[in-house]
Image: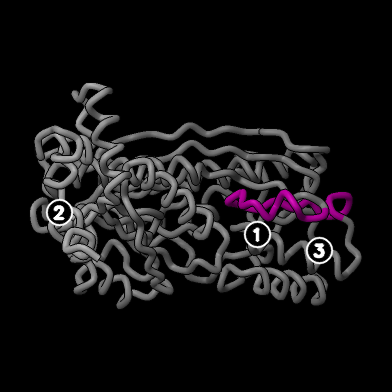
């Protein structure tokens, strides 16, 4: 084996082989747009012939970038976060970025570690869906790494924020059930703490979705009945099945169920099947998130589609722009709220799949108040 075969192929080797300058090879590798097609083809052919591999360590020292970003979510066991991670990976790949996945368990200490720990230095930016940290921890988000927040727990932090239209979407889901003539609509998922805080500011998926539910009842002239709130924690299938099963076995009467996520809805469907309750004839059922599993349930489940792919695309776009800006930018932080849709399927009496409501999104400067916080009906 020759000395040439033993050593790594360099950019200079590729340049000599292609008959171009090292700068031209660099421009081709970095996808510089103003390269003649013939020159690009010749360089790429030389790269393939010599087996050249980019020295990522040297590139990182030169550019101070790794080409990697972190996505930190509470748990991949929940289908929503697994599908979100898949969407983020696809969007990052389009931009030549690799995604490192962190699972925080929704614990505040793990989220702080993701924000400030040593592993943060391994990637160029962070997309974080916090669950343990709240708006009271805003100082924790003032980091020197590009950051995009997801979800509904933290508002007003110094970062771009991508979230979903929880209040309007939940209101539309409840209105869909009311439109079917259902009168006793239970909600699976809220807990005793899922109400607005002392300032009236609402945060968290459960609180915001419950606000939308109550808003729909009020608009329809229906009284809110706290007995129809069925706690279920965590938001897994097993919790949904157990919570609704216990409610029904205790004599609870409902003709519709709004589950605050699809995992709870799938568990609720199991509990109804186990008690031979017909869906949707006796009890109509709708979930939230529109994960793939709902299309393969029997019956297929109606659900709210909160714009998951749009969330992933927007988060990666915002993060990539901050990274390209050198990690610091004078650009104003923005909060993006994605479009959402209520999709009716067999569990609410629709044969097939039909969009019954759409709520437009928005893009506004980051503020401390979350979506829905100004709705007077739910301030305390």
Asked whether 286 falls inside the magenta stretch, the response is yes
Question: Quick check: 260 left or right of 1?
Answer: right
| Disc 3 target residue | 253
Tell me which numbered mark, 3 or 1, is placed earlier along the sequence: 1
| Disc 1 target residue | 187
Q: Is the residue marked by circle 1 packed among few (<14), some (14-19), or many (20+) residues within 10 Å?
A: many
Q: Which residues are magenta?
A: 279-298
| Disc 2 target residue | 59
Do the numbered discs 3 and 1 sit on residues whose CB atoms are within 8 Å? Answer: no
- Could one spot residue 257 in this view of the protein? yes
Do the numbered discs 2 and 3 sit on residues whose CB atoms are within 8 Å? Answer: no
Q: Residue at x 54, y 47 (%)?
A: 212
Q: CA distance from mark 2 to mark 1?
A: 53 Å
> Measured along the vertical axis of the image, is residue 68 above or below residue 103?
above
Question: Quick check: 327 left or right of 115?
Answer: left
Q: CA distance from mark 3 to mark 1?
A: 12 Å
> Measured along the vertical axis of the image, is residue 295 above or below residue 45?
below
The quarter holding residue 169 reads top right
Q: Nearer the viewer, mark 3 or mark 1?
A: 1
Residue 340 x, y percent position in the rendering? 53, 39
Q: Residue at x 58, y 43 (%)?
A: 305
Camera-nearest residue between 17 and 217: 17
Q: CA distance from mark 2 to mark 3?
A: 64 Å
Camera-nearest residue between 246 and 279: 279
């Amino acid at each position: 084996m020759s000395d040439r075969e033993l050593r790594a192929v360099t950019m200079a080797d590729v340049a000599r082989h292609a008959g171009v300058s090292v700068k031209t090879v660099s421009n081709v590798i970095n996808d510089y747009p103003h390269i003649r097609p013939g020159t690009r083809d010749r360089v790429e052919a030389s790269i393939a012939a010599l087996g050249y591999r980019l020295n990522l360590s040297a590139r990182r020292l030169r550019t101070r970038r790794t080409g990697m970003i972190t996505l930190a979510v509470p748990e991949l066991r929940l289908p929503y976060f697994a599908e979100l991670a898949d969407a983020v990976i696809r969007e990052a790949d389009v931009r030549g970025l690799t995604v490192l996945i962190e699972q925080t368990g929704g614990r505040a200490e793990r989220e702080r570690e993701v924000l400030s720990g040593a592993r943060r230095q391994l990637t160029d930016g962070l997309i974080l869906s916090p669950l343990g940290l709240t708006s009271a921890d805003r100082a924790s988000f003032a980091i020197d790494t590009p950051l995009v927040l997801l979800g509904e727990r933290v508002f007003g932090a110094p970062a771009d924020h991508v979230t979903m239209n929880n209040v309007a979407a939940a209101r539309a889901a409840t209105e869909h059930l009311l439109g079917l003539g259902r009168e006793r609509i239970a909600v699976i998922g809220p807990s005793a703490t899922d109400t607005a805080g002392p300032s009236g500011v609402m945060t968290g998926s459960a609180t915001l979705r419950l606000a939308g539910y109550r808003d729909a009842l009020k608009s329809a002239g229906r009284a809110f009945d706290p007995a129809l709130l069925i706690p279920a924690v965590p938001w897994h299938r097993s919790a949904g099945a157990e919570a609704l099963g216990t409610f029904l076995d205790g004599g609870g009467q409902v003709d519709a169920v709004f589950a605050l996520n699809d995992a709870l809805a799938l568990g609720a469907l199991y509990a109804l099947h186990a008690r031979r309750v017909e869906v949707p004839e006796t009890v109509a059922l709708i979930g939230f998130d529109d994960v793939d599993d709902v299309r393969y349930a029997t019956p297929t489940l109606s659900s709210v589609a909160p714009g998951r792919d749009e969330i992933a695309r927007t988060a990666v776009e915002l993060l990539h722009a901050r990274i390209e800006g050198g990690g610091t930018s004078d650009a104003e932080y923005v909060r993006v709220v994605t479009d959402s849709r209520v999709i009716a399927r067999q569990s609410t009496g629709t044969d097939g799949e039909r969009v019954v409501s759409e709520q437009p999104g928005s893009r506004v400067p980051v503020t401390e108040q979350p979506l829905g916080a100004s709705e007077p009906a739910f301030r305390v």
